[in-house]
């Protein structure tokens, strides 16, 4: 039986933004949302940065459906950044990566629900019924970690701490951290973002302070705790 938390409020859902880089899947999901969820207005974005620019516009979509595997995203950090940009808009993860570790990390990062990518139409219908009632939607078969065990492992605890620290970053700081992870130097980041190098340096200092680290390398390691590689079973 599908899991959902207790209802909190009613939420109108008439428009949606699909963030996925596969046009055929976007088309199929659009048709599904229109037929089973009554979503009249649907837009799509093929990259995280495109989605973030869209949610800056008014009006914002009522709900966002996010694929974790995007050209400019390598983990749960994309969900964290999108939630920061779209404050108050529920973000539902629709992903083929349906391992319990991935689902748990998405929930820790504030996802409003998780739907495996190739779910039946009835599952999407149930997901939107839950969202409209203010409940978080979880897929059938998901087993959360025992209460108080923080994912049951030290690695799980480190991941949750990393998610919490990354959520403290501003949008610009999160973008700069992503570029640091890509190996760019301050001068290159300044050029990429059209800002002064001194501004980049100030942001890097703030990033390290918020993450509780002393170096760029340590900041990258924190970010990598949310990468897909860290979420997969060892040897898998």
Image (cartoon, grey):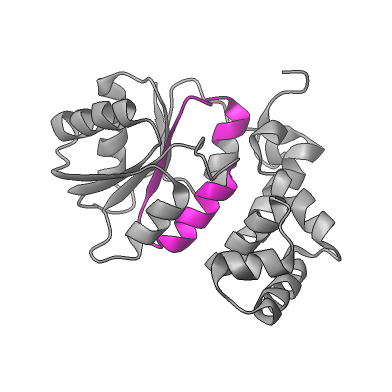
Horizontal and vertical percent position of residue 4 = 40, 36
- From the viewer's perspective, tell me whether residue 113 is left or right of residue 163: left
Quick one: quadrant of the N terminus? top left
Magenta residues span 75-103
Q: Is residue 170 visible?
A: no
Which of these two is toward me, 163 or 172? Answer: 172
Q: Vertically, is 51 above or below 230? A: below
Q: Quadrant of residue 106?
A: top right
The C terminus - image quarter:
top right
Foreground residue, 21 or 189? 189
Task: Tell me where residue 46 appears, x and y as whole percent.
Answer: 39, 42
Identify the residue shown where x is 58% and y is 25%. 99
Out of 101 and 51, give the one closest to the viewer.
51
Say whether residue 34 is visible: yes
Residue 150: x %, y % from top left: 70, 41
**Which residue is at a point 53% across and 45% down the rendered structure image?**
72
| Position of residue 6 measured from the top left corner of the image (x, y, whole percent) | 38, 44
Vertical comparison of 135 with 121: above or below? below
Q: Residue at x 23, y 33 (%)?
A: 30
Q: Is residue 30 above or below residue 99?
A: below
Q: Residue at x 69, y 42 (%)?
A: 148
Quarter of the figure with residue 119: top left
User: Is residue 38 shown left or right of residue 24?
Assistant: left
Magenta span includes 130 = no
């Amino acid at each position: 039986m599908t899991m959902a938390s207790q209802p909190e409020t009613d939420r109108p859902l008439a428009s949606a933004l699909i963030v996925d880089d596969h046009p055929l899947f976007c088309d199929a999901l659009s048709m599904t949302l229109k037929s089973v969820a009554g979503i009249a207005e649907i837009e799509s974005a093929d990259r995280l940065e495109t989605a973030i620019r869209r949610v800056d516009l008014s009006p914002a979509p009522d709900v966002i459906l996010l694929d974790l595997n995007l050209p400019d995203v390598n983990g749960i950090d994309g969900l964290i950044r999108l939630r920061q940009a779209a404050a108050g808009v529920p973000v539902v993860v629709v992903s083929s990566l349906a391992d319990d570790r991935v689902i748990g990390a998405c929930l820790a990062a504030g996802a409003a629900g998780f739907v495996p990518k190739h779910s039946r139409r009835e599952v999407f219908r149930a997901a939107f019924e839950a969202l409209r009632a203010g409940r978080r939607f979880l897929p059938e078969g998901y087993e959360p970690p025992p209460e108080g065990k923080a994912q049951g492992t030290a690695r799980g605890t480190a991941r949750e701490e990393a998610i919490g620290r990354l959520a403290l970053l501003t949008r610009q700081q999160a973008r700069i951290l992503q570029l640091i992870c890509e190996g760019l130097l301050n001068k290159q980041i300044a050029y990429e973002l059209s800002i002064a190098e001194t501004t980049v340096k100030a942001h890097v200092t703030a990033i390290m302070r918020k993450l509780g680290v002393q170096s760029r390398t340590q900041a990258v390691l924190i970010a990598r705790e949310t990468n897909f590689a860290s979420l997969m079973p060892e040897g898998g």
